[in-house]
Image (tube, rainbow, N blue to C red):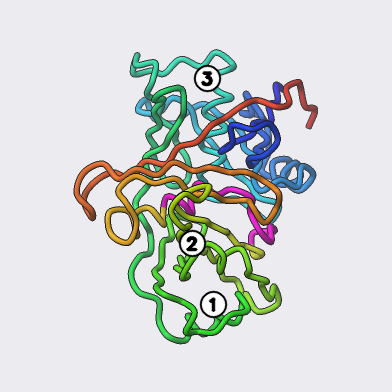
Amino acid sequence: MRFSQVDVFSSEPLRGNPVAVVHDAAGVTDEQMAAFARWTNLSETTFLLPPTTPDADYRLRIWTPGGELPFAGHPTLGSAHAWLGAGGVPAAGAEDVVVQECGAGLVRLRRQDGRLSFLAPPLVRSGPVDDADLRAIARALGIDRADIVDSAWVDNGPGWVGVLLADADAVLALQPDWAAFGGLDIGVVGPHAAGGPADVEVRAFCPGLGITEDPVTGSLNAGLGQWLAGDRLPSSYVAAQGTALQRSGRVHVSLVGPRGTGEVWVGGDTRTTVSGTVDL
């Protein structure tokens, strides 16, 4: 089977988040998918399959070393890049619009100014975080409860809860207590000062998925955009992520339309870094 490994969310080689993509995976079993995801040991490994609906161009299954996800952002962008690079032609006839089928439903992608972006799927859980969870989140992050400026559930499938800190320095200084997570998947965001490398700094902690810290995370940034864009953050902004892991991720988030009812688009650069075949 054809295989691609795509670096996502960085214009610099080897500085984003890689996703392993297996093409033409219709004959691959669940057990083989899970085993290959554990073997690659990347944040996500994906498998391209024929769609089950005429409304989609392909179906995508997304696996972490710990199990399958209904949706994830950087695998969505990287897999679309790989599918197009292998000669995929969108059924709608529009070169710059791709429709992906996955566990979360249909996800629309577009190419604009040479960069792929996806439409943030609806949140499956949103709203305020209760005090007991906030105390647990603070313990897991190794900070005081008072250091949390704001918080919200921003779950579009992986289980994210979003936490806003005072600034980017506070985000980069975090030293999580992994034993205290108790199944939480925590995304943290803080603003950079004017003239900084990006508008905000983001970190994603998800030990329950078999990953302690994810380098650059599309699903989290989609949820954070739905929560913060056009309110505490501008309608369009750039998030830096991966700095603490010596990566240079840049996630482009745009709210199109009114807050609450508009569309949030999440985009980034993609490039194939490894290509060949895989024998499962």
> Does residue 126 lie above or below 71 as drawn?
below
Q: Nearer the viewer, residue 39 or 96?
A: 96
Seen in the picture, residue 181 relative to 220 is either above or below; the reply is below
Q: Position of residue 242 (x, y in %)?
A: 63, 51
Name the residue at 40% across, 43% down: 105
Residue type marked 2:
Val
Magenta region includes residue 217: yes
Q: Nearer the viewer, residue 231 or 42?
A: 231
Is 213 inside the magenta-drawn segment? yes
Residues drawn in magenta: 209-222
- The residue labelled by disc 1 is 137
Q: Residue furthest front?
A: 195
Label located before the other in sequence (3 or 2): 3
Q: Amino acid at mark 1?
A: Ile
Instruction: List x then y, in percent, for residue 85.
Output: 57, 18
Q: Amino acid at mark 3?
A: Leu
